[in-house]
Amino acid sequence: EAGVAQSPRYKIIEKRQSVAFWCNPISGHATLYWYQQILGQGPKLLIQFQNNGVVDDSQLPKDRFSAERLKGVDSTLKIQPAKLEDSAVYLCASSLGFSMGKETQYFGPGTRLLVL
Amino acid sequence: GEDVEQSLFLSVREGDSSVINCTYTDSSSTYLYWYKQEPGAGLQLLTYIFSNMDMKQDQRLTVLLNKKDKHLSLRIADTQTGDSAIYFCAEEEGGADGLTFGKGTHLIIQP
């Protein structure tokens, strides 16, 4: 079974530029998550989708971050404009999403963003 | 709000047992997880425990949960060099909610 795919793996941009990350979840997984992991910290949830609807985006900085999952499969996370403090690893995870008990989240390898 | 606390570093000798501790604040947590992250890699789920359990064993891994004290631990028996990584404790309220992670414990293996 293929895992969660993310691209690009690395990205270097200058502050005030825009950047987009892509995630392809495990086939059949209805729930998709984006996490931000700043160096030396644990991942922090940014947004959670159930199919193509947003379940939780309370920690997403909506003035500069946006995410979509138009067809309920792949997702993109965009930052516009980027700030220095956005330098982090952006992790995508997916789970079955049937809410019938334990939901194991499977993580992708992440996209490492460096903002100069 | 929710908070998960872990020690930042743990150093053990190869072959000894490692015990990584975690405390959490959300008493409504349904599941608690341990994830492993190796350098440059994503998060790998090691094990999890349901909140109505107090112990779970899986090969070299033993998870202990003290729900009264909101304390979770991960014991790795016969620690090997391949166990060197960052270990994250995480809690989930239930269903398909996002996880709240600790800052991670760096496990350092001494030869």
Image (cartoon, coloured by chain):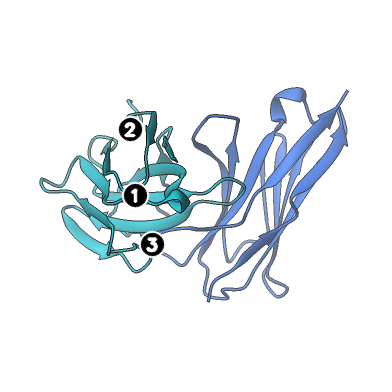
Q: Which mark is residue A6?
A: 2
Q: Residue at x 30, y 64 (%)?
A: A57
Q: Is residue B7 left or right of residue A25?
A: right
User: Looking at the picture, which amino acid does disc 1 mark?
Assistant: Ala
Tags 1 and 3 in contact by the CB under 8 Å rule? no
Chain whose colour in the figure is blue: B
**Which residue is found at the position 58% from the left and 66% from the top?**
B52
Q: Secondary structure at mark 2?
A: strand
The correct choice, above or below, for A58 with respect to B83 in the image is below
Label located before the other in sequence (2 or 1) = 2
Question: Marks 1/3: CA distance?
Answer: 27 Å
**Is residue B100 found left or right of A81 in the rendered image?**
right
Q: Position of residue B45 (x, y in %)?
A: 53, 41
In the current view of this chain or complex, which residue is farthest to the left? Answer: A71
- Tell which of A64 and A71 is nearer to you: A64
Judging from the image, mark 1 belongs to the subunit labelled A
Which is in the foreground here, disc 2 or disc 1?
Answer: 1
Question: Are discs 1 and 3 located on one and the same chain?
Answer: no
- Quarter of the rendering containing residue A45: bottom left
Q: CA distance from mark 2 to mark 1?
A: 19 Å
Colour of chain A in the rendered structure image: cyan
- 3 vs 2, front mark: 2
Regarding mark 1 in the picture, which secondary structure is present there? loop
Q: Amino acid at mark 2?
A: Gln
Residue A94, horizontal then vertical, whole percent: 33, 44
Which residue is the site of mark 3? B97
Q: Residue at x 34, y 47 (%)?
A: A95
Q: Which residue is mark 1?
A: A82
